[in-house]
Amino acid sequence: MTVLVTGGAGFIGSNFVQQWLGARDERLVNLDALTYAGNLANLAALDGDPRHVFVRGDIGDRALTDHLFAEHQPRAVIHFAAESHVDRSIHGPDAFIQTNVVGTFSLLESARGHWDSLSSPDRDAFRFVQISTDEVYGSLAPDEAAFSEARAFAPNSPYSASKAAADHLVRAWFHTYGMPVVTTHCSNNYGAYQFPEKLIPLVIVNALAGAPLPIYGDGQQVRDWLYVDDHVDGVTRVLDAGRLGERYHIGGLNQLTNLDVVRTLCAVLDELRPKAGSYADQIRFVKDRPGHDRRYAMDARKIERELGWRPQHSFEAGLRETVQWYLDHQPWVEAVTSGAYRQWTTLQYGA
Ligand code: NAD
Ligand code: DAU
């Protein structure tokens, strides 16, 4: 048997691919366009493993995806591929619409063609797992209850609007065509292989370089942080046993302000890589993100009740492992922070 993973050279996708092949003896076809966020070095541990078939290509390339479905006959698609960074979506939304909306549409149509060609029991067993985000729900007030699966979408950024649009397509393919889909909505992930444009790896990389640690606005925005291994486990549970047409929330049960996250990171760095003074001295408040959502929080009781999933890593333990990973993988950091990365940080943060 074979599964098709999209975006498996990115942060969460590469963690998924490694955990999948570490735990199961099932072939995995990994379709990734290798944008700035995709990196084959994330998959170096799988070099020579015949169960991992890497294909460089675009999810929107219909001829390619039709060919992959025909050749590999996957029993499931786990769709991670996306443009994923909110700040980039503000500077340039085009790629977000192209990949997240048009690309997902094309992939869905290709998957539908494959699914239509199957007969029972393969047809009944087929799954399309859409990986989405808490950001499609918009922003919560400080005392408001966490987002439940019944909440209406109210996306506020080009990124979250593009993810919400894709989720609507997936939902409609279930209702209209009966496609066997299931959607996960996850909160903020952190862990190994995260590209240092996102808050936690950016702060680690800047701290070690003696550079400013930029906090947008007042730093009181709240996110619900989840260790990436727990997200991967949640997606696997949903693939194995999620009910068709349903949404499942995967949350960290761990709401923190950005300022608290950065201060905690600085304290871990002070301990693991001591220097004169504290890394917290490098914190700087900078211009806020336009349309910045104030708070996200996920009600993840449904996945716990139905599928027995709960996060297994505390924030303290997960963060410490993450900092240690970045300390131990300086060549990886140097490779991804060359060239185009500098152009991005100059555009976003100024010289
Ligand atoms: P990422 O940016 O690290 O990786 C995205 C991957 O998709 C990259 O390898 C990239 O090369 C690939 N890709 C982009 N466009 C493509 C295209 N057109 N065709 C094929 N491949 C393409 O993203 P991530 O943080 O790993 O997020 C993965 C998924 O999880 C996304 O769908 C994102 O919306 C969702 N998500 C992320 C988080 C988070 O905190 N990072 C939280 C919830 C949900
Ligand atoms: O909530 C899930 C989402 O989490 C995913 O869907 C997205 O793909 C992922 O990028 C992430 O989005 P965020 O915008 O929440 O993540 P980011 O790491 O960019 O920012 C986290 C918070 O930190 C946010 O409130 C903005 C703030 N921030 C971020 C950066 C990069 C700063 O204060 N300074 C920064 O330099």
Image (tube, rainbow, N blue to C red):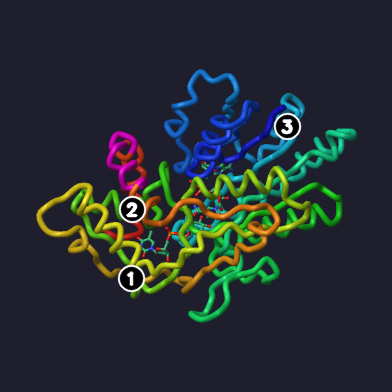
Please give the residue where the numbered disc 3 appears in the rendered image.
74
Please give the residue where the numbered disc 1 appears in the rendered image.
287
Mark 3 or 2, nearer chain start:
3
- Labels 3 and 2 touching (C-beta < 8 A): no
Residue 329 lies in the magenta-colored region:
yes
The spot of residue 258 in percent (x, y) is 37, 66
Left or right: 49 as drawn, with respect to 337: right
Could you classify mark 2 by the number of other residues whose Cα lies within 10 Å: few (under 14), some (14-19), or many (20 or more)?
some
Q: CA distance from mark 3 to mark 2?
A: 36 Å
- Residue type at mark 3 is Pro
Mark 1 or 2, nearer chain start:
2
The spot of residue 97 in percent (x, y) is 60, 55
Depth-wise, is mark 1 or mark 2 nearer the camera?
2
Quadrant observed for ligand 2 in the rendered image:
bottom left
The residue stretch that appears in magenta: 321-332
Please give the residue where the numbered disc 2 appears in the rendered image.
202
Question: Residue reaching furthest left?
Answer: 276
What SS does tag 2 mark?
A: helix
The spot of residue 247 in percent (x, y) is 70, 58
The prevailing secondary structure element of the residues shown in magenta is: helix
